[in-house]
Every structure is written in C-alpha cells, then in structure tokens.
Image (cartoon, grey):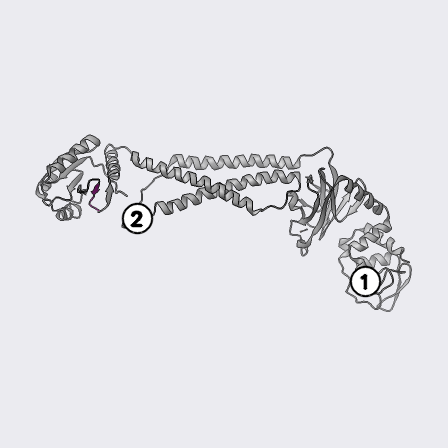
Amino acid sequence: MTSRPEANPRRVLIVSSHPLFREGLRSLLQERRPGIEAIGLATSTDEALAALDRLAPDLVIVDHDDAAVNREEFLARFVEGERAMRVMLVSLKEADRAVVYDRHTLTASQIEDWLGGLAATARGAPLSAPQTSRRVEMKHFAIVGVLVIVATVAVNAGLNAVGLMPVEASEQARVIDRLFSLHVTVISFLFSLIVVFLLYSVVVFRRKPGDTSDGDHFEGHTGLEVAWTLGPLALVMLFAGLGAQALADTRRPEPNAYVVKVVASQWSWSFEYPDSGVTSTSLNLPVNRQVVLQLTSQDVIHSFWVPEFRVKQDALPGDKLVKELRLTPTLIGQYKVRCAELCGRQHAYMEAPVVVMSQADFDAWITKESAISNDPVARGKKWAAQYGCTACHSIDGTKIVGPTWKGLYGHEVALADGTTATADDAYLRESIVDPTARVVQGFAPNIMPQTFKDRLQDQQISDMIEYIKTLK
Ligand code: CUA
C-alpha cells in the first residue's frame, strides 16, 4: 500500500503557513518518532526553497490544504524537476485521515505504520511489521486456520463417502486400509491448506478500485522455509515408518498357515493343495486361517491380485523363483483373482474364482476334490469339462463340431488325406497338442484351437486319454 522510502529520511522539512500544522506535526514526530527529526519549518514556497539549500532535508512534508503553498509548483520543482527529492503532501482536513501526495488515502493506523517504517529505516534497522498490522495478520491467520480445519474435515468425509475401496475381506486389507485412510486424511489437509489460502487471498486481498500500488516485497522468510522443509520431511519419514510397519504386518507368518501352490500361465490360474493332492481352477480358502500362496508362472510374468484382499504378488517364470504371499480371509464370499501384470492378448480376462468358506465347508470340498484327484478318469472328465472339450466332442456318439469320443479309443480313424490311423495314446495326444497334424475325414481342418499344447499339462492330457478310454 505504501511506498516506503529507500534512503534513510531522518531530516524533515515541514512546509505550512499554519502554525498548528507545523508545530503540531513537529511535536507529533518528536513524541512518537524519535528517529525522525523536524529540522526546519517553512511557511511558504519561497521560504522552503531557501531552507532546502541550507538544510538539505531528506523529506519535505507539505500542507496539502494550505492556500499559501502552491503544491502544483512544489511538485513541479521538487519532485519532477532537477532537484528531484521526496515530498510528502499531507492533508489533515479530515479528522482521522491524511492524504499523501500520490493521492493514496491512508487511515490513521496506516499513517502510524508508514511513520513507523520511516522511523525504523531512519535508525538503520530492518523494517519491522508495525503492531497494528501484525494484529491484522494474526486475525487473517486465525480465520484461515479455522477454514483449513473445516475444509480438511469436509474433504476427508467426502473422499471417504465416495467408497473408493472394495469390501475389506482379509486381515491384510485392514492394515492397508488403515494406512490408506491416513494418507487420505493428509491429502485432504494439504489440499485444504493450499486451496483455502489461495481462495482467501483471492477474495480478501483483492485489489481495491483505484489502487495502483505494488504489493510488499519480501526477500524471504527463514522460519517459513525451515518449517516447510522440516514439516514434510518429518511427515514423509513418519509414513516411511508406518509403511514399513504395515508391510511387516501383512507378511507376518502364522503357525497354522497352510500352503496353496498357485501356477499362472497364459491365460489361466491353477491352484494346487499339496496336503491333499487336490488341483483346482478355483481358489477355495477357509475363513480366518492364514494361507501361504507359493506363486510361479509357466511362461511370462503374471500378478496375483484379489482387490478385496488388497495384497498383490507377481508370479515369475522359472521353478526356482517361487514368490510367497500370505493372506488371511476374514469374510465368507466369492471373489475373483485378477492378473495385474500385462501378460498378453487375454490378460484382461485372466481371472479365476476365489471362494472363502467355513472350515467345515472347506474340509468337505477337499474331501470331494481329492476323491476326484486320485482317480485319473475322474480327473480327465473334469479337465474335459473345464477346458471346454466336450462342447465340441460329444461323449454319446453325436456329431457336433469335432469327432465324438464315444468308441474312439483303439479304433481305426479315416483321415482327410485318405490314409487311416489307430486312435491310440500317441494319436490322441498328437490330436490335442497339434490338431492340424492328422485331421479326421469330414471335419474342418482348422476348427480346433491350437492352444492346448500350452494350456494343458502332460498329466492332464494323460488323464483325458484315460477318460476317453472309458467311453466305449
Ligand atoms: Cu497374466 Cu496378465
């Protein structure tokens, strides 16, 4: 608001034909501003001119309302002329206001501030914020502080109400959600801090009509800089500590944890239960018991992810690179494993069901599955259904898309090239892994997918052949 002097004005010449103005101002300066000395009093323009050469003042204060003093001439000769010096025109007509020469209207307290700044520079001390403006500043900070708190609470509540997270279905999810919600709170606070300060400044410190002055110039503020360096540093270190703690919590082994081997491949999941020899395409888990998943991949990198459990772990190719993931389901229900690593064309559809059940249901499921698992024919039947084989190959003699499996094993097959083959183990295996090698007469040559070579394990193919053998 004010144009503060650059030099040190301590010697002041007062120009007015009114003794009240002259003496009043002099005693005011004497009383209130010991740094400023009224070295001369002039009653007219001519007297001021003469005094100027004699006294060489730093500042001339001119009575703005004095008819005996031609202020236009004053401005022309002292401000704009070759003597260019500091002149302050002061009008005291209004009881609580003064007008200085550049037409800024100052309130009484602003004049106090202005003179305060003048006195401070006069003593060669750094400019200190005057008492009144400090009080005003504190008021602004108090308002902004309250607004920041209110905005933080509101933004935090808003973000929580959006419900960004899926249901919390594991012990690990609790740990991660706690950390996440702390992050959201800090984010709400930082957002509010910036936006409230910004909007408050835009509204409250808006330029007043007619005000063309520059804002205050600040070189820096050491306290503020130290605070905004150490504050975030402390916060980041706190979160590093909390993050490490959360990581440790999600990996803490429990003594009764049991093992499930997870095999990822393009583009399916398979789950093995070593305790019982069960293999499944769905991940069945008992509730409230920790499971250790041992993940591997048969081809590229995949990533095991059940959003409701929060935790995620890559599955890497190579038998030696077994990755472990511990999780403790806490909520009975059906979920889905997703692959969280871009792994090829069908990546987006690489899903498998996850079923969390009671311990009793789980035991029953294991018993049922292991009965199947110990019988190659039952297993083969299961694979045939699971991999969609029986959608094209009937087991009752009906001709669908491909040859029926009924009565196939051991019989002569007429091939498209006019030769014949015996449907033995070798022929069936070849037909599964390389279906274009020997196509049966009367069937389209390229209709069967050529992906089973990658999707099926040797054991699964053998199981299916055992199953086909039984379809007499
Ligand atoms: Cu496997 Cu993406």
Name the amino acid, label 1.
Ala
Q: Looking at the figure, which quarter contains the N terminus? A: top left
Q: How many numbered badges does the structure rendering display?
A: 2
Residue farthest along the front direction in this orientation = 95
Secondary-structure class at tag 1? loop
Q: Is residue 164 above or below residue 444?
A: above
Residue at (34% x, 39% y) in the render:
219
Q: Specify whether 370 is left or right of 203.
A: right
Q: Which mark is residue 264?
A: none
Residue at (15% x, 35% y) in the render:
24
Q: Specify whether 386 is left or right of 74.
A: right
Residue at (37% x, 39% y) in the render:
140
Q: Are marks 2 and 1 in contact (CB under 8 Å)?
A: no
Q: Position of residue 295 (x, y in %)?
A: 71, 44
Secondary-structure class at tag 2? loop
Q: Looking at the figure, which quarter contains the C terminus? A: bottom right
Q: Position of residue 163 (x, y in %)?
A: 58, 46
Q: CA distance from mark 2 to mark 1?
A: 88 Å
Indicate which label's residue lies in the foreground, 2 or 1: 2
Residue at (67% x, 54% y) in the render:
347
Q: Specify whether 174 is left or right of 90.
A: right
Residue under numbered circle 2: 208
Range of residues picked out in magenta: 97-102
Q: Position of residue 423 (x, y in %)?
A: 88, 60
Residue under numbered circle 1: 437
The local crowd at label 1, few if under 14, some if 14 to 19, many if 20 or more residues have their Cα within 10 Å, is: few
Q: Specify whether 381 is left or right of 220.
A: right
Name the amino acid, label 2.
Lys
- Residue 312 shows in the view: no
Q: Position of residue 165 (x, y in %)?
A: 60, 45
Residue closer to the observer: 320 or 356? 356
